[in-house]
Image: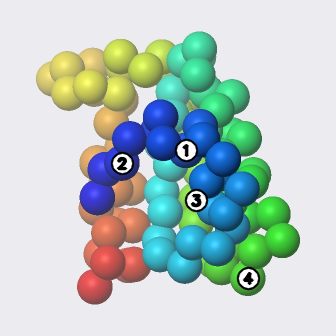
Amino acid sequence: MIGCESFINQPILRYSNEIRSAVLIIHGEKAHSCYFSRDAYANMIKDSKYTSNKELMIIPDAVHTDLYDRGDKNAIPFDKIDGFMKEYLK
């Protein structure tokens, strides 16, 4: 499932550490909004009982547009996404 990050920017973020479902956050290291994913992930695992199925993946040297499908210059970690889904979304 793909969600809209704008909703995370609302006060509901304070409850993100109650999420039991698997979460994989992927962001480009050089994207201007990378701080937001780092903060959201940190908030999600802080004081949480449900951390074993949460992961933050920062793509080195990538900006947000590098994570679109651009053929051979693709930075999308399809193998990681596939593995994560197979492990947690059975």
Q: Residue at x 58, y 59 (%)?
A: 55
The amino acid type of the residue labelled 4 equals Lys
Of the residues under marks 3 and 4, which one precedes in the sequence? 4
- Alpha carbon distance from label 1 to label 2: 9 Å
Residue 51 lies, with reference to residue 9, above or below; the image says below
| Residue to which mark 2 is pinned | 3
Residue that mark 1 sits on: 8
Q: Which mark is residue 56?
A: none
Q: For the image shown, how many numbered marks are present on the structure?
A: 4
Q: CA distance from mark 3 to mark 2?
A: 15 Å
- Between residue 44 and residue 83, name the one nearer to us: 44
Q: Position of residue 79 (x, y in %)?
A: 31, 54
Residue in the picture at 55% in, 44% down: 8
Asked if the residue under mark 2 is in contact with the one under mark 1, i.e. CB atoms within 8 Å, the reply is: yes
* Residue type highlighted by circle 1: Ile
Q: Which residue is mark 3?
A: 55
Q: Secondary structure at mark 2?
A: loop
In this picture, residue 82 sits left or right of residue 45: left
Callout 3: 10 Å neighbours few (<14), some, many (20+)?
some
SS for callout 4: loop
In the picture as drawn, the residue positioned furthest to the front comes out as 11
Q: Secondary structure at mark 3?
A: strand
- Callout 2 crowding tier (Cα within 10 Å): few <14, some 14–19, many ≥20: few
Task: State the residue position of label 4.
Answer: 49
